[in-house]
Amino acid sequence: MSKIKIKTELSKKLQELLSGNIARKLVTEKDVAYVASMVQFLILQRTERGKFINPDAKTTYSPAYKKKRLREMGYTNSRVTLFYTGQMLQALRAKVEYEKGIPIGKIGYFNDSYRTTAPWPRDPSPAQLAAYHNFLGTGKSRIKRQFLGLKKEEQKKVSEILTKKILSNLRNYK
C-alpha cells in the first residue's frame, strides 16, 4: 500500500472522528436499545425487591395502609415494592430517540401527560403515580420513594456493558 493511500485513509478516519460520524458507528441503535432495556429491567428488579435510590425511603407501609392493602387487595406483606396494581411499573418504557443523528436511550412514561401539583386526580395515570413517588411524595407524610434512575453500582454495570459494546464495534469499525 502506498504512503499516499495510507495518508488518505487516515485523513478520512480523522475527518469522520471530527465530524461525529464515529459516534454514529460505535454506538448503534441496537446497542442503545439493548442498554435502555437493561436499565428498565434494573429499575423494575430493584423496585420489586423494595429498594429505592434514596436511602432514607421508608421500606414498609404504615399500619393503616397495610390494613387497607389487606382489605382491598389481599396483600399481607407490608414491604414496599410499588406493585400495588402493577400499572405504574408496567407502563415504564424504554425507547430510542435520535439527537443530532446519534441514538439516545430514554426510560420513562411516554404519551402520558401528567401534572405534578395538587389537587391529585382520583384515578392518577401511571406517569402521575411515578411523579408522586419520585418527586412529590405520597400519602399524608409525602414519603418519597425514588425508583426512576440508577444507583452507583447499577450505573457501573451499565457502563461496563456499554463499554464492551463500543469496544466490539471499534474492533469491527471500517
Image (spheres, rainbow, N blue to C red):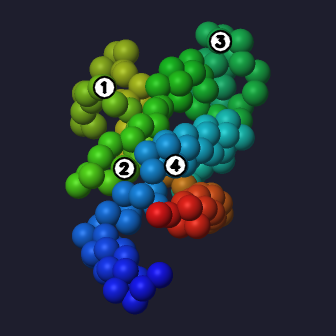
Q: Nearer the N terminus, badge 4 or badge 1? A: 4
Dot 2 corresponds to which residue? 103
- Give the quarter of the image for residue 102: bottom left
Q: Nearer the N terminus, badge 4 or badge 2? A: 4
The answer for how far apart the CA atoms under marks 2 and 1 are is 22 Å
- Density class for disc 1 (Cα within 10 Å; few <14, some 14-19, many ≥20) is few
Q: Of circles 1 and 3, which is in front?
A: 1
Task: Identify the disc placed on residue 73.
Answer: 3
Q: Is residue 132 visible in the rendered structure shown here? A: no
Say left or right for 152 vs 75. Answer: left
- Density class for disc 3 (Cα within 10 Å; few <14, some 14-19, many ≥20) is few
Outermost residue to the right? 76
Q: Of circles 4 and 1, which is in front?
A: 4
Residues tagged 4 and 3 counted as in contact (Cβ below 8 A):
no
Task: Identify the disc placed on residue 31.
Answer: 4
The answer for how far apart the CA atoms under marks 4 and 1 are is 26 Å
Q: Amino acid at mark 3?
A: Met
- In front of the other: 161 or 147: 161
Residues tagged 4 and 1 counted as in contact (Cβ below 8 A):
no
The answer for how far apart the CA atoms under marks 3 and 2 are is 41 Å
- In front of the other: 74 or 36: 36
Q: Of circles 2 and 1, which is in front?
A: 2
Residues tagged 2 and 1 counted as in contact (Cβ below 8 A):
no
Above or below, 29 against 167 in this view is above
